[in-house]
Image: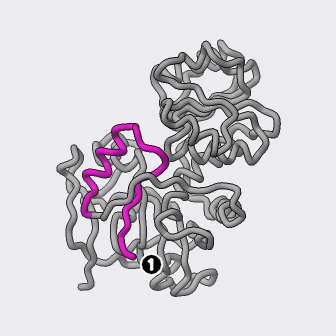
Amino acid sequence: MATMKAVRIHAYGGLETLTYEEVPLPAIAQDDVLIRVHATAVNPVDWKIREGYLQGFIDYDLPLTLGWDVSGVIEAIGAEVTDFKPGDEVYARPDIKRDGAYAEYIAVKASEVAFKPKAIDHIHAAAVPLAGITAWHCLFESANLTAGQRVLIHAAAGGVGSYAVQLARWKGAYVIGTASARNRDFLMELGANEVIDYQTTPFEEAIAPVDMVFDTMGGDVQERSWQVVKPGGILVSIVSPPPEEKVAAHQCRSAYVFIQPRADWLTEMAQLIDAGTIKPIVETVLPLSQAAEAHKLSQSGRTRGKIVFQVRD
């Protein structure tokens, strides 16, 4: 049986559950493509699944290969696939219910795959799908953000936040981000109009009401954010569903987003990347064998942009 290297978990738990091992090469269905993985990125959902937080929401058969960002080259295609061929450079946010991309190969539905941006390498392309789709969905699908509106983006220097800043500015919004002082100049370069140092300044005391709050933090940050949403505005969270009583009390709208694969949005983002309008931010590149170190960094909440595994040159 053909095999490959992958990082899997055999049980839910801490960093020690991440196992770098030899596993069978994935089989592909008629509507799948087999991607030879060049790079894959780390996202908070990876370690949340590893620790068992999504049990009951998504039920997995263990062992499970983690990782749902991929950039690579198509190795083989299923019998029903007509849009791609072996040798095509592609990227995707695969179905999170299947084995992921912490591996040398991954099977992905062809409908979830888009051609990789030409202007960037696989390491930077792997940093786009999950975070980019999340930002796109929250800003444009949930909030219908338009030019001239004011948006507050929490954790603006992070993986999702750094895309949200760029996409909101591209749309013509007035962009306010919360971040540490070290990220102020970085976010201004990405297009933020204002940056609030969350370590020294309560954001709710520093800004006038906004049309949209993009909540990437939950907890106390979400609770305090109600103070700055305009009546008729919207709070969109990717962490926890906003309480209905808060929405009613503040006469605004809300949304909770858990994204699905969207190859059409990846195609649009590839065009923006190739045009130089947005750029992926990669702070750390590690080999797949250092998955535990990558998860530790992600869980610290202090990373700028994305952490990426380079699987092959």
- Farthest residue to the right: give it: 148
Vertically, is 163 above or below 254? below
Q: Quadrant of residue 39?
A: bottom left
Vertically, is 143 above or below 120? above
Identified at 34% across, 38% down, the residue is 300
Residue at numbered disc 1: 34
Tell me if 127 is positioned left or right of 141 in this view.
Answer: left
Tell me if 8 is positioned left or right of 238 in this view.
Answer: left
- Which corner quadrant holds the N terminus? bottom left
Disc 1 packing (10 Å; few <14; some 14–19; many ≥20): many
Say if the magenta span includes residue 307.
yes
Find residue 98 and report its horizontal and vertical position in percent.
Answer: 40, 62
Q: Amino acid at mark 1?
A: Leu
Find residue 269 and report its horizontal and vertical position in percent.
Answer: 66, 60
Q: Quadrant of residue 184?
A: top right
Tell me if 99 is positioned left or right of 18 in this view.
Answer: right
Q: How many marks?
A: 1
Vertically, is 273 above or below 181? below
Any part of residue 120 in sight = yes
Identified at 71% across, 18% down, the residue is 208
Identified at 56% across, 58% down, the residue is 261
Closest to the observer, 162 or 226: 162
Identified at 79% across, 42% down, the residue is 172
Closest to the observer, 261 or 123: 123
Q: Quadrant of residue 13?
A: top left
Render colour scheme:
one colour
Q: State the extent of the magenta-drawn residues as a range.
A: 289-313
Find residue 16 and report its horizontal and vertical position in percent.
Answer: 17, 49
